[in-house]
Amino acid sequence: MQDGEPSAIDPKSPDETDLDLLKLAQKGSETAFGELMERHSGRLFRLGFSLLGNASDVDDVLQETFLGALKGVKSFREKASVKTWFTRILVNQIARHRRYWKLRASPRAISPEGEEILSGALVPAKPSGTEVQMDVAAMLQTLSPEHRMIFALREMDGLSYEEIAATLDIPVGTVESRLFRARSELRQRLKAYLDK
């Protein structure tokens, strides 16, 4: 192993679980932690982008997420999965980023040319299928941070209600009600958008 940590586990083996790798990382294996980062970076980037909408901001938050995970790797206690642990750190970093920059979802506005703008995306008069997909992402940015977070964790990241509850440290019932409201809001906005 390149960092000098003897182990029977090969961190590059696709058969090794996240937990196996995390245990190696807790013993100081940089290779194992690097493999964990590689396994989760794409998923975390997509989730971060759905919540922040800016690749540069997501890169910054993702870097802070991995730094935070590296600093806290020895304190991981297997109360949740490694996936949930990384997600929780990302969610906390996004919240910190929003507080720092005081990011707010922008309301609908009218451009100088008279076109409606939804979170920075021009809304076409007769949207095509691809344009609808792109503007659904923009519509997500108009949800409250709590509803956007729940929706992204469930629909984009595929977490179970229990995993979302553990990630956000809220009751499962709160997850269910916020998800219901988020879906309702998006459904109404999408219907109004398509009925133009």
Image: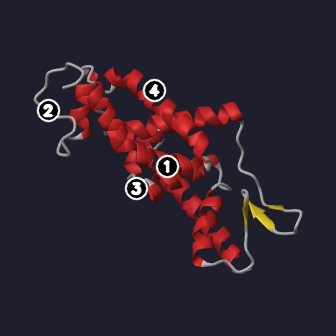
Identity, as a three-letter code, of the amino acid under mark 3: Gly
Residue 49: x %, y % from top left:
55, 49
Give the spatial CA distance, label 3 vs label 4: 23 Å
Residue 139: x %, y % from top left:
65, 61
Rendering colour mode: secondary structure
Q: Residue at x 65, y 54 (%)?
A: 141
> Is residue 160 placed above or below 91 in the rendered structure?
below
* Tag 2 and tag 4, C-beta contact below 8 Å: no
Nearer to us of marks 2 and 4 is 2
- Image quadrant where one finds the N terminus: top left
Answer yes or no: is residue 80 visible: no
SS for callout 3? loop
Report whether 115 appears left or right of 187.
right
Identity, as a three-letter code, of the amino acid under mark 2: Ile
SS for callout 2? loop
Q: Which residue is mark 3?
A: 158
Badge 3, how many Cα within 10 Å: few under 14, some, many 20+? few
- 191, 126: nearer the viewer: 126
Nearer to us of marks 2 and 1 is 2
Answer yes or no: is residue 129 visible: yes
> Is residue 20 placed above or below 161 in the rendered structure?
above
Location of residue 121 (image quadrant) = bottom right
Give the spatial CA distance, label 2 vs label 4: 25 Å
Give the spatial CA distance, label 2 vs label 1: 30 Å
Location of residue 138 (image quadrant) = bottom right
Identity, as a three-letter code, of the amino acid under mark 1: Leu
Q: Which residue is mark 4?
A: 68
